[in-house]
C-alpha cells in the first residue's frame, strides 16, 4: 500500500521541526512516512518495541494505561503538532503507554535512526524534545496533585479548564469530551462524572450548548 507524499509545508507547521532549515525539512519529508487512522484505532500498545516517533498532523489521540484488572486511565489527550513515542527512543525501553485515536487522524512518523541523527545534529530540536518531556512531567505532577487534594467536582473543573480555549472573551470546550474519558482522567466512574457535570450546569458553573460545546463561567475556577 502506497502512502501519500509529505509536503514540506506540513512539517514546517509542526513546532518540533520549526528549528530545521529548508534543506533539512526537504530531506526529512523524503524520509518520513504518512499514515491515517480512523476513530478508535490503536496506534501503538504499551509494551511494544520502540521504533519510531509519531507526530500528529490532524485529529486527536488519547494516551492511556491499563492495570492488571483492565481498568484504563487516560494520561493525556494530544492534538495536531503534538508528538509521542520519544521516551522509548531516548531510553530504549518498550512503549510505556497505549495510544488510541479519538477521531479520524493523520500522522507522520520518523524511524529511530533518523530521530537519533536529528537530535545529534540539531541542538535546538533536542531542546524542543526536552521541553516536551518537562511539560509532560509537570502535567503528571498536576494530576497527582489533583487526585490527592481535589474532590471530584474540583477534578472535573480542572479537566474542563485544561481543555478549554479562549473564544470571543469566553472559555469554551469546543472538542467533544466524552464523560467516560473524563472519568478515566480523574479516577472516577462515568456515572459520578455525569452527576458532577449536571450539578455544575444546574449551579451555573457551565453551560452545555446544543452542539455539545461547553461554555465555562468565570466562577468555575473557584470550584476547584
Image (tube, rainbow, N blue to C red):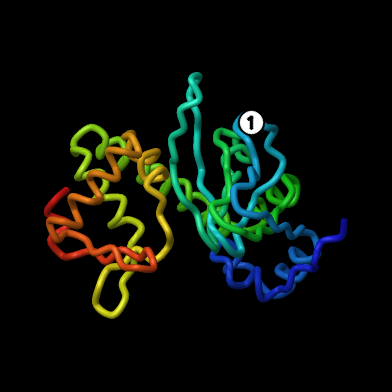
- Which residue is pictured at 28% across the width and 57% down the height? 161
Query: In the figure, is residue 184 to the left or right of 169?
Result: right
Q: Position of residue 76 (x, y in %)?
A: 44, 46
Could you say which quadrant of the image residue 170 lies in? bottom left
Could you say which quadrant of the image residue 206 lies in? bottom left
Q: Position of residue 127 (x, y in %)?
A: 51, 55
Q: Nearer the viewer, residue 200 or 15?
A: 200
Residue placed farthest to the top in the image?
68
Residue placed farthest to the front in the image?
210
Could you say which quadrant of the image residue 80 lies in? bottom right
Q: Nearer the viewer, residue 29 or 184?
A: 184
- Which residue is pictured at 32% across the width and 40% down the height? 143
Q: Residues within 10 Å of mark 1 (few under 14, many from 20)?
A: some
Residue matched to label 1: 94
Element at label 1: loop
Q: Is residue 95 above or below residue 138?
A: above
Q: Position of residue 79 (x, y in %)?
A: 51, 59
Q: Position of residue 34 (x, y in %)?
A: 74, 60
Query: In the figure, is residue 17 to the left or right of 134?
Result: right
Q: Is residue 188 above or below residue 134?
A: above
Q: Is residue 92 above or below residue 155?
A: above
Q: Nearer the viewer, residue 70 or 109?
A: 70
Tally of marks: 1
Residue placed farthest to the right in the image?
1
Q: Nearer the viewer, residue 126 or 103?
A: 103
Q: Quadrant of the N terminus?
A: bottom right
Q: Is residue 104 above or below residue 6?
A: above
- Which residue is pictured at 32% across the width and 76% down the height? 167
Amino acid at each position: 500500500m502506497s502512502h501519500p507524499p509529505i509536503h514540506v509545508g506540513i512539517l514546517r507547521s509542526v513546532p518540533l521541526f520549526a528549528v530545521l532549515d529548508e534543506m533539512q525539512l526537504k530531506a526529512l519529508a523524503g524520509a518520513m512516512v504518512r499514515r491515517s487512522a480512523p476513530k478508535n484505532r490503536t496506534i501503538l500498545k504499551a509494551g511494544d518495541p520502540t521504533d519510531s516517533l509519531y507526530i500528529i498532523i490532524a485529529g486527536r489521540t488519547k494516551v492511556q494505561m491499563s492495570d492488571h484488572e483492565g481498568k484504563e486511565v487516560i494520561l493525556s489527550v494530544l492534538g495536531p503538532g503534538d508528538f509521542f513515542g520519544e521516551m522509548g527512543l531516548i531510553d530504549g525501553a518498550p512503549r510505556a503507554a497505549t495510544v488510541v485515536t479519538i477521531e479520524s487522524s493523520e500522522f507522520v512518523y520518523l524511524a529511530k535512526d533518523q530521530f537519533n541523527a536529528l537530535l545529534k545534529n540539531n541542538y535546538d530540536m533536542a531542546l524542543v524534545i526536552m521541553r516536551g518531556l518537562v511539560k509532560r512531567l509537570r502535567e503528571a505532577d498536576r494530576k497527582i496533585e489533583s487526585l490527592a487534594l481535589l474532590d471530584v467536582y474540583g477534578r472535573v473543573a480542572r479537566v474542563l479548564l485544561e481543555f478549554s480555549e479562549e473564544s470571543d472573551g469566553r472559555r469554551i470546550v469546543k472538542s467533544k469530551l466524552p464523560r467516560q474519558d473524563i472519568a478515566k482522567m480523574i479516577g472516577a466512574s462515568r456515572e459520578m462524572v455525569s452527576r458532577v457535570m449536571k450539578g455544575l450546569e444546574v449551579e451555573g458553573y457551565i453551560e452545555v450548548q446544543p452542539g455539545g460545546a461547553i461554555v465555562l463561567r468565570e466562577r468555575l475556577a473557584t470550584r476547584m
